[in-house]
């Protein structure tokens, strides 16, 4: 069952996070942009309020939360009610699929990746941005999980677990980018973007079909 309840009840808090953590958000955007193909034919799964789709030029999103869909529509994104495990799209329809901080909220990570694999063209890519469970912020989020309205329903994954599931459905040729090297409260400017993983808390993986 889609984990929509926090996003329905706490839409203001969700939006407020991006305002309060402006440089964290901009750092994450930069890390994703580095991995994003130069194509207009992409979709974001778990588009939320469009905080990533809009600046990245993605025109179509899918999200199970009614409240999030209302917000993102006002931002000019075409949004469809649906879940990652059952995408309402044809096979090999897109050049890329993007998922940002979505994998921790899906019910079935492997089914979600299988659907993304189905929806992208041969040679197309799945780009995933997420908090690495083994990172400093990942460990902190897990420690305080029960007190956070969003993360108490989340399942955090390590980079190795995400790659394992990606490989199982057929993805290959992985490229990694990382950012967020400090605690959120300490970040007063855009963080550096580095290749690889294991240092930054926010990791972007690009996987090819």
Image (spheres, helix red, strand yellow):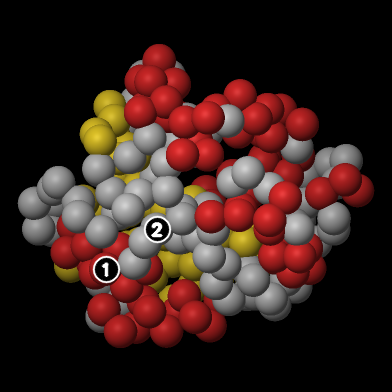
Q: Secondary structure at mark 1?
A: helix
Q: Specify the farthest residue to the left.
A: 90
Q: Quadrant of residue 190?
A: top right
Q: Which residue is mark 1?
A: 111
Q: Residue at x 75, y 37 (%)?
A: 21
* Residue 105 percent location from the top left of the image: 46, 55
Please report contact status of discs 1 and 2: CB closer than 8 Å, yes or no: yes
Distance from the alpha carbon under mark 1 to that under mark 2? 9 Å
Q: Is residue 161 left or right of residue 87?
A: right
121 or 167, nearer to the observer: 167
Q: Residue at x 25, y 43 (%)?
A: 82
Q: Quadrant of residue 26?
A: top right
* Residue 93 percent location from the top left of the image: 14, 51
Q: Which residue is mark 2?
A: 106
Quick check: 186 above or below 75? Answer: below
Q: Is residue 116 left or right of residue 33?
A: left
Residue 202 numbered tag: none
Q: Is residue 67 left or right of residue 101?
A: left
Q: Residue at x 53, y 65 (%)?
A: 155
Quarter holding the C terminus is bottom left
Quick check: 123 above or below 93? Answer: below
Q: Secondary structure at mark 2?
A: loop
Q: Specify the farthest residue to the top.
A: 74
Q: Residue at x 9, y 58 (%)?
A: 91
């Amino acid at each position: 069952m889609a984990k929509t309840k926090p996003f329905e009840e706490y839409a203001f808090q969700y939006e407020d996070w991006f305002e309060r953590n402006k440089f964290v958000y901009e750092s994450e955007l930069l890390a994703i942009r580095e991995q994003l193909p130069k194509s207009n034919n992409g979709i974001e799964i778990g588009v939320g309020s469009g905080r990533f789709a809009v600046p990245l030029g993605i025109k179509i999103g899918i999200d199970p939360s009614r409240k999030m869909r209302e917000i993102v529509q006002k931002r000019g994104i075409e949004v469809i009610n649906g879940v990652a495990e059952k995408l309402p799209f044809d096979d090999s329809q897109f050049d890329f699929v993007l998922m940002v901080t979505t994998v921790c909220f899906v019910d079935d990570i492997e089914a979600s990746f299988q659907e993304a694999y189905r929806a992208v063209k041969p040679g197309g890519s799945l780009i995933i941005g997420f908090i690495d469970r083994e990172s400093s912020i990942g460990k902190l989020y897990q420690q305080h999980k029960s007190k956070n309205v969003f993360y108490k329903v989340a399942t955090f994954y390590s980079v190795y677990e995400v790659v394992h599931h990606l490989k199982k459905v057929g993805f290959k040729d992985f490229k990694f980018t990382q950012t967020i090297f400090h605690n959120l409260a300490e970040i007063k400017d855009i963080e550096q973007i580095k290749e690889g993983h294991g240092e930054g808390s926010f990791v972007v993986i690009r996987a090819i079909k």
